Amino acid sequence: MTGAVALLRAIAADRAVPIAAVVILATALALAFGNSNGTVPNWLVPLVGKYLCYALLAVSIDLVWGYGGILSLGHGVFFGLGGYAIGMHMMRLIGPRGVYAHPVLPDFMVFLNWTELPWYWHGFQHFPFAAAMALLVPGVVALVFGFLAFRSRVTGVYLSIITQALTFATMLAFFRNDMGFGGNNGLTDFRDLLGFPVRSDGMRIALMLASAVALVLSLLGCRALVASRFGMVLVAVRDAESRVRFLGYRPEHYKLVALVISAMLAGLAGALYVPQVGIINPSEFAPANSIEAVVWVAVGGRGRLVGAVLGAVAVNAAKTWFTGALPELWLFALGLLFVLVTLFLPRGLLGLFTLRRSSIAATPAVRPA
Amino acid sequence: MRVATPVTLTLPLSLREREPCGTLRQRSPLPQGEGQGEGDWRATLLTLLVALLLAVALPLRAQPDPVAALSTTNFDELGRAVERLGVSGHPQALPLVEALRDGRLFRRASDGTLFWRDVRGAFHAAATGEPAAEITPAGLQPLRLNNRVRRAVDGALGSLSLFNPDPRLRLEAGGGDLGGLQPLRLNNRVRRAVDGALGSLSLFNPDPRLRLEAAERVFRGRDPEALAALETALAQEREPRVRRAMELAQAAATLASTRDNEAKLAAIATLRARPDLVSRGTLAAFAGAPAPVGPAAAEAVAAIDRHLALLRVGQDVVFGLSLGSVLLLAAIGLAVTFGVMGVINMAHGEMVMLGAYTTFVVQDLMRTHAPFMLDWSLAFAIPLAFLVAGTVGAVIERTVIRFLYGRPLETLLATFGLSLILQQTVRSMFGANNREVGNPSWMSGSVQLWELSITASRLWIIVFALLVFFGLLLLLRRSSFGLAMRAVTQNRRMAASMGIRTPRIDMLTFGLGSGIAGLAGVALSQIDNVSPNLGQGYIIDSFLVVVFGGVGNLWGTLVAAFTLGVVNKLLEPFAGAVLGKILVLVALVLFIQRKPRGLFPLKGRAVEA
């Protein structure tokens, strides 16, 4: 009992987190009710659902970057893998309703003259298995990658560059038809999920609400994590890795755990994202996408979790508006945002609101040597 | 057998205008036609052609009755039989082939005897053409055709009509009838014969280039009839290149001839000494011949295959080196900024792109204002690209990066933002489409290096990359600016206390790195399309090169760039371009695990700071 109280207290220590949780849930519920009685247009629901998934991805990046000091330029890999896992599930559910009406093989495999299902497609007809894979596959990839990288003390920009190479290599691999993931076109034409048609209004509302709940839970979970002893050490690793090592800790273990959790959250985000947009293809692995996600965190304010949510929603809302109103100016705006935020808002948008320096969130201010 | 009297034919242009008629008649050792007047050389040619056709047909006459050979249900055999019939000079050849074409040729199921039906429905015996009144359609099956046979029929009809006693038909065969527009049709055999004839005729041409061409043509045609002419020509040939070609032609023709095995084995050895696909094809055609010629030919084919495989590896290595030099150009600029300043410049690729667009603009201006200097546009583009990219780089350093020293991750983000801005700027100025930059004339074409043929532009890029590399090395080692730069790299604070203005060095270093990227853009514009996304394609690779080679070590960058380039290209034939790239990336990621600071890490206390 005391443990639970302590946990709640730790979560509430950064008051922005419970506030954000309430705001997110309230907004999602309001949208859901508004949509079912007709006051909220249909297109807004999946759009908000998409933003919530992006926000979850941003939270996962903030966990490793803001608290662990690991700038991953490859979170798109985890996001995409989660998306592919759920995409494969929905492909299997199409069954004989596909264009080629093959009872087992997805259309693209029939098209490529494949005769049987590759081994890694087995089991995906069951939702629990696919859902587990959406979390486990990114987790295992992160575990292997992180184990190798942290063990040999690859840090800083080197780590960033090889994560970028990782996502680039993944993109190239998934573009290949022989990989069995639909190549260029990816996976699409989904019909239903858990027995309900994916493109129905009810399903959209349900997915949006599920994203909101997942985001809130992750936010609270991450907050509890970073407020724990583990989180303290993680922040210490971020600020002075060698010193932490000299104190007898194993920084690589802390970083590895953080990276694996983060990858699984990103996978969850991808898994929620794909049914809402109806497609997953290799361009999700494009290095620019991963960098863009990092920028959401930077814009919102890293090391604050809520900042990640704020940044993801703000930047994507701006993107939606720009690409509609001034498409040719969007890249200018995004580029300027990168530059201005890093130059003038090192603590992001959140830094504008909070004058008090939260002890745990403070970004180490390194002066030019 | 009939020898056609010469007729004036409208020969296809390519046939007609090969040789001036003087040479044809003056040197020809072959029998000449009796044509006269305006069409006389054409007539000569035609006579020659026909004579050759008949000559080709001669050895075949020894074979079993060409008409009986038609009695088969195997399409391949039928096709061959038709070809043979077409050149056999058999008196019944034309009606038979025509009947076959129209489905009027029948085979008696009981004994395989052939009959053809004329237009009135009467049957004739195939061998003699005599009417066969007693035959009824009951026991007969029409011979069926496939495309292979149809081609043979067409070919045979074409050549048969040339032999026809009826000049009207001959004329038609030559395309000289009222329609008048039909060219003389050749099948492959006729084509080879024509090649052979032309070949042996121009073997004696005073122009060595034409002699060479003629020898090559005989070589391709493998015409044993040309042997005599070839040997005469060879005896008086002085030009070594032409001699070699003639020897090869002689070898090919010997293989096709009826000469003894010893001559043929020698011919195989000669062909083997020229290991290319044409020799291989020639040899492979005789690999099935009886021993000892067949096995020797097969062995020679295998040897040539080995040689060609080796050659391909050599070619891949050269491609790899040229890819490596592009990577080197793109990466050394990065090595400078990354190595010296610890700054990750994600906009580096855009500096490359700016260099490429500078080249494009310079060339465009020259085309409109000074077209006579177009070949030298690169001489202006190179310094200008360096200046443009360098200036932009220096400005970026002054306005953005300066404020972010010591925060490499933020620098990375800010410069990525800059790269987006630069790309979009260029896109709105020049459009999103690819722009083409032409090669100057001295850079187009290809260079023959041993047996490898290398595109000149790629060779120039290797040279250019090495020049830039050693120039930079010289600058760093020998100039006071280089000294200051190295001092700042090794110990910024100490350098500052010694009176080096580190901010100025930072700016210049960044400008220098960006300027070199601009030079890379000039090089890339020569082999790649110039588009706003040009730099993005190279940025990840360049980063990997720098990290692989060891940050701050130019030699490491050199080794890494060429290694990556060559490995990439060597993997391509086995793994495919994409998988090869993935393999390289994975190998690099693993390599960085083993040696986190690259192949040639900087050592010393300053590194860990």
Image (cartoon, coloured by chain):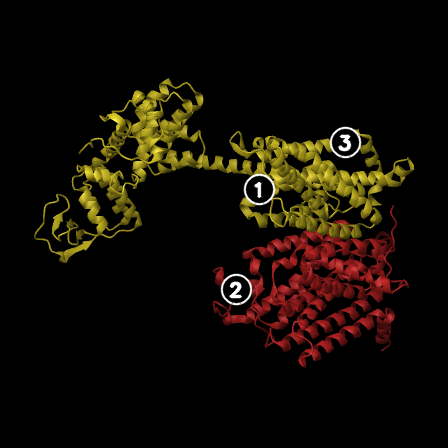
- Please state the chain letter of the residue tagged with numbered disc 2 in the rendered image: A
Kindly identify the amino acid type of the residue bearing the numbered disc 3. Leu
Quadrant location, the N terminus of chain A: bottom right
- Residue marked by disc 3: B475
**Which secondary structure lies at badge 3?**
helix
Distance in Å between CA atoms under marks 2 and 3: 60 Å
The yellow-tinted chain is B
Kindly identify the amino acid type of the residue bearing the numbered disc 1. Leu
Q: Position of residue B389 (x, y in %)?
A: 72, 41
**Which secondary structure lies at badge 1?**
helix
- The answer to whether residue A255 of the structure is visible from this angle is yes
- Residue marked by disc 1: B570
**Of residues B451 and A243, which is closer to you in this image?**
B451
Question: Disc 1 or 3, which lies upstream in sequence?
Answer: 3
Q: What hue represents chain A?
A: red
Judge depth for marks 2 and 3 and give the one in front. Answer: 3
- Residue marked by disc 2: A117
